[in-house]
Amino acid sequence: MTLKFVLSTRSQLAVLLILVVALGTQKEMAKAQRNACTSELSNLNVCAPFVVPGAANTNPSAGCCSALQAVDPACLCNTLRIASQLPSQCQMSPFTCGQIPLF
């Protein structure tokens, strides 16, 4: 004996509505995460004087350290990963930073 599970049209619509709401919620959460990441990264501008090659002072300020501590590691890592893909997307040879001497 086989059992068939048939959803009524009303049940199918309810399931579809739940899926649409769940997907919409997930999309909004991703958008909120992107916005938070953008905000966190923009706060890192206080670190610019300490990371520019040839900077006189390479010791970060308390403000820089605070801004860095506020950045979600996933945000920073994903940003660096995306930035590392830019040369190939601009039809350039990839950079190999490990072979470039520090100055």
Image (tube, rainbow, N blue to C red):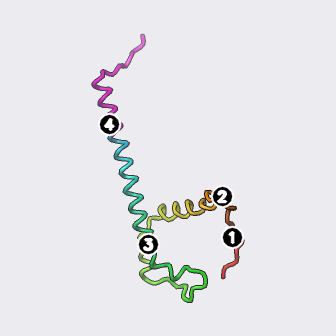
Mark 2: few/some/many CA within 10 Å (<14, 14-19, 20+): few
- Marks 1 and 4, how far apart in space? 49 Å
Label 4 packing within 10 angstroms: few (<14), some (14-19), many (20+): few
Q: Residue furthest left?
A: 10
Q: Earlier in the sequence, mark 4 or mark 2?
A: 4
Instruction: Give the percent coordinates (x, y) of residue 9.
Output: 30, 22
Which residue in the protein does label 1 denote?
A: 98
- Identify the mark at residue 18; answer none if there is no mark: 4
Determine the secondary structure under disc 3: helix
The disc labelled 1 sits on which kind of residue?
Gly
In front here: 33 or 52? Answer: 52
Residue that badge 2 annotates: 91
Q: Which residues are drawn in magenta? A: 1-20
Residue at which label 3 appears:
69
Amino acid bearing label 4: Ile
Q: Residues within 10 Å of mark 1 (few under 14, many from 20)?
A: few
What residue sits 40% from the left and 53% below the top? 30
Q: Residue 77 magenta-drawn?
A: no
Image position, residue 39 (x, y; %): 40, 67
Mark 2 belongs to which amino acid? Gln
Question: Could you tell whether 37 is left or right of 79 in the image?
Answer: left
For the residues labelled 2 and 3, the Cα–Cα distance comes to 34 Å
Residue type for callout 3:
Gln
Q: Is residue 41 above or below residue 18?
A: below
